[in-house]
Amino acid sequence: MKAFEKNIRKVEPYVPGEQPQNKVIKLNTNENPYPPAPGVKEALLHMDTDRMRLYPDPAAGTLVHSLAEYYGVGDDQVFVGVGSDDVLAMCFLTFFHSDKPILFPDITYSFYKVWAELYRIPYECPALDDKLRIVQEDYYKENGGVIFPNPNAPTSIYEELDFIEDILEHNRDVIVIVDEAYIDFAGKSAIELIDRYENLVVVQTFSKARSMAGMRIGYAISNPLLIKYLNDVKYSFNSYTMNQTSLVCGVEAVKDRDYFEEQVKKIVDTREWAKEELRALGFTFPDSKSNFLFVTHPQIAAKKLFEALKSANIYVRFLGGSRIQNYLRITVGTREEMEALFSFLREYVKSKGE
Ligand SMILES: *Cc1c(COP(=O)(O)O)cnc(C)c1O
């Protein structure tokens, strides 16, 4: 090792799902199979390219305002960033600054551990129970902050708001972040709790239900004080996080509530049908309230199936890890994509049974 290497910050990076550049059935990174709202395309066609000479609005005012209106909160209660990954990274840096460990589940979004390591934040990971549920009592102990997704990823399980409130009640003195990347496929958002719990931060994204993973837009909703602390850190890091094109497209997407709700409903319907198909093939899975299914099969090795699917140009996600070694995470695609998946699975399951 060279002498200078000892001063280099070494991290074990997050490993994103594959983004194959050829045409495949892509059910591996929980993207939306439908295009964004038609207004987004329209806005892009009329983009003022001369505007690109200038820096974008550092406060992302137009997008912040449209999100504030959508959720019925003040403009000073919304923070936007380059995907929720950026928003979450800023949240870790801003809110998790204690000597005590922050808490998040052992099986959850694997980026949390990466940020904790990157920022040298101590952490503990209480284990999910054997049904892959978060055990709320594990979050009653002293800690430096709490974060979990609802629905949780990759388990797909949604917890009702009384569960969230219970964790908030037991954690009045630290910041609690609820990562709601999949909330639109699930149920009530914790946004309605922000007035009652001044330590709550809710994070959402345009990447899943809003069909705009490629645009990189995420946001946090909280009270004005916590949003100010977030902005102070953001301006100390990079003032111009949101590019002009994303700002324009983001505003257009938020405008079209009907289109958004229609696409979400299609995905939820496909998901419920897919559950029946999977059950008929002998797969088991938690009752998903997100746009993906976390499946396992008593007679089939997940990793082998993952590879067989990949050879057939059907991409799903194998995450590995000790307790979920035999699980695959399958994004809910279009009805046609899922039909193709099931015709492969029917053959595969049959050949394993013989
Ligand atoms: C997809 C996802 C994110 C990140 O999404 P962005 O594309 O960065 O907005 C954050 N948290 C969870 C749990 C996710 O599944």
Image (cartoon, rainbow, N blue to C red):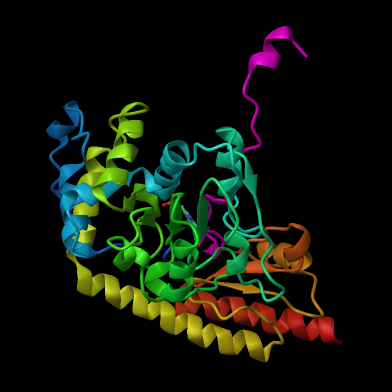
Side of 75 relative to 96 (left or right): left
Q: Is residue 50 above or below residue 133?
A: above
Q: Residue furthest top?
A: 3
Q: Is residue 336 above or below residue 143?
A: below
Q: Residue at x 62, y 69 (%)?
A: 135
Side of 225 relative to 314 (left or right): left
Q: Quadrant of residue 225?
A: top left
Q: Residue at x 69, y 82 (%)?
A: 283
Q: Is residue 166 magenta?
A: no
Q: Is residue 10 magenta?
A: yes
Q: Is residue 48 above or below residue 257?
A: above
Q: Quadrant of the N terminus?
A: top right
Q: Residue furthest right?
A: 354
Could you tell me residue 309's position as x and y percent?
68, 67
Could you tell me residue 17's position as x and y percent?
58, 52
Magenta stretch? 1-30
Q: Quadrant of residue 67?
A: bottom left
- Number of disc labels: 0
Could you tell me residue 219's position as x and y percent?
33, 51
Q: Is residue 352 above or below residue 170?
A: below
Q: Quadrant of residue 52?
A: top left
Mostly what secondary structure, the magenta segment? loop
Q: Residue at x 28, y 75 (%)?
A: 261
Q: Is residue 269 visible?
A: yes
Q: Quadrant of the C terminus?
A: bottom right
Side of 257 relative to 31 (left or right): left
Could you tell me residue 131's position as x and y percent?
68, 76
